[in-house]
Image (tube, helix red, strand yellow):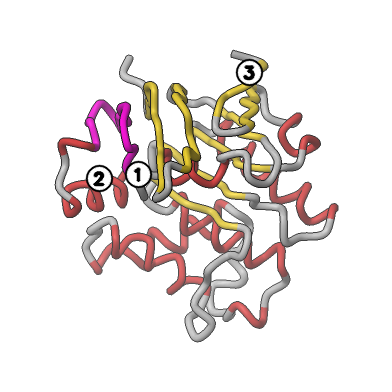
Amino acid sequence: MTPVLEIVDAVKEYTGGVRALDGVSLTLHAGEAVAIVGPSGSGKSTLLNLLGTLDRPSSGTVMLDGHDISALSDRQLSALRGRRIGFVFQQFHLADGMTALDNVSTGLLYAGTPRKWRAAMAAEALERVGLSHRLKHRPHELSGGERQRVAIARAVVNRPALMLADEPTGALDTATGRAVLDLLLDLNRDGTTLAVITHDREVAARLPRQVEIRDGRIQAEVGV
């Protein structure tokens, strides 16, 4: 079976010869739940950008659903990303003036979903994360945990092959963060492939596979 995402010998260099990633290889298979863990400056954010196809490697290969991203135009890559990857960020990135339903619907706009289907699909996604009673509420009317659940609903509304969560509990208190991680793991058990980028080893320990990155290189893996 073709991996959901595969990175082979990826190097990412920036101006001045700074090497943020140094020969990283990583394969994510359908249905996996993996934590990518490391301290600040370890290369986690750069690796996230490659996993999400938001950036291209200086050398090496990134394959998404069997497509070599280096062979795709920016437009083709954007369309593939919109269909196949969902993103969850620490700071939620919700539009303040839009309802929860409309915030989730925007995820379908970028995936090219016809307008007539968006509201129903967004409502279903919000129901999956336990927010069917908050469809018309705006972000300022929601708690931090509820805002993160809206962001998760937006990430999974198009049922992507891969969900990338970047420090998804970082802006939440301990109990709320635990509940949000429970939700992500429930979605994984329902079939969503999940990669969580975190510096928190307690968060990482709850995922069955852990990949440790340091100084731009993968240092260790557990649960492979």
- Amino acid marked by disc 1: Thr
* Residue 152: x %, y % from top left: 55, 55
Residue toward you, 72 or 85: 72
Q: Which residues are magenta?
A: 56-69
- Label 3 secondary element: strand
* Residue 140: x %, y % from top left: 65, 82
**Precedes in sequence: disc 3 or disc 1:** 1
Q: Residue at x 77, y 35 (%)?
A: 201
- For disc 1, the marked residue is 53
Q: Residue at x 33, y 14 (%)?
A: 1
Which of the 4 image quarters holds residue 214?
A: top right
**Mark 3 surroundings: few (<14), some (14-19) or many (≥20) residues within 10 A:** some
Q: Residue at x 47, y 43 (%)?
A: 18
- Label 2 secondary element: helix
Residue 75 in the figure: left or right of residue 171:
left
- For disc 3, the marked residue is 221
